[in-house]
Image: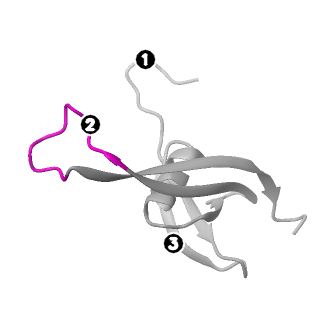
Amino acid sequence: MVEKGKQKETRNFALRDENGNEIAVFTGRSPRQAALKAANRGYTDIKLRERGTKKVHVFEGNRIQADKPKSAPAWMPDKIWKPQVKKTGTENLTEL
C-alpha cells in the first residue's frame, strides 16, 4: 500500500536476448512501462527480468507511426513513433 503523498518506487528491468544475456536495463514503476520503453527503441521480442527477482515478464512489442497530438508543441514533428506492447505471460528463471 502506498502512503499518501509518497510516490511508488521505480524498478529496474533487465532486457534479455534469445541467449539469456542481459543487454539493456529499463526503469519504470511497472513491467509494462519498461516494455514500452524497450518497444520504442525497436525491440519486438521483449523479455524483462526484474532486478532482484527470478521473474521474467514476456511481451510482444512494436511501434507504429502516428500523427502528432493536437496539443503537441510546435517543434514536434508531424509524425511520431508510438510503442505498443502486449503481455504474453511470465516465466520463472528456475524453470528455464
User: Who is closer to the viewer here, 21 or 43?
Assistant: 43
- The reply to whether the magenta stretch includes residue 41 is no
Task: Label 2: state its secondary structure.
Answer: loop
> Dot 2, crowdedness within 10 Å: few (<14), some or many (≥20)?
few
Q: Which residue is mark 3?
A: 24
Query: Is 42 located above or below residue 23 in the figure?
Result: above
Q: Is residue 85 left or right of residue 92?
A: left
* Cα–Cα gap, marks 2 and 1: 32 Å
> Dot 3, crowdedness within 10 Å: few (<14), some or many (≥20)?
few
Farthest left residue?
Answer: 74
Q: Which amino acid, mark 3? A: Ala
Between discs 2 and 1, the one toward the N terminus: 1
Q: Which amino acid, mark 1? A: Lys
On the question of residue 12 being in view, the answer is no
Q: Where is residue 55 shown, x and y percent of the image?
A: 74, 55
User: Who is closer to the viewer here, 72 or 58?
Assistant: 72
Q: Which residue is mark 1?
A: 4
Single out the mark in the foreground, 1 or 3. Answer: 3
* Cα–Cα gap, marks 2 and 3: 30 Å
Q: Is residue 73 left or right of residue 49?
A: left
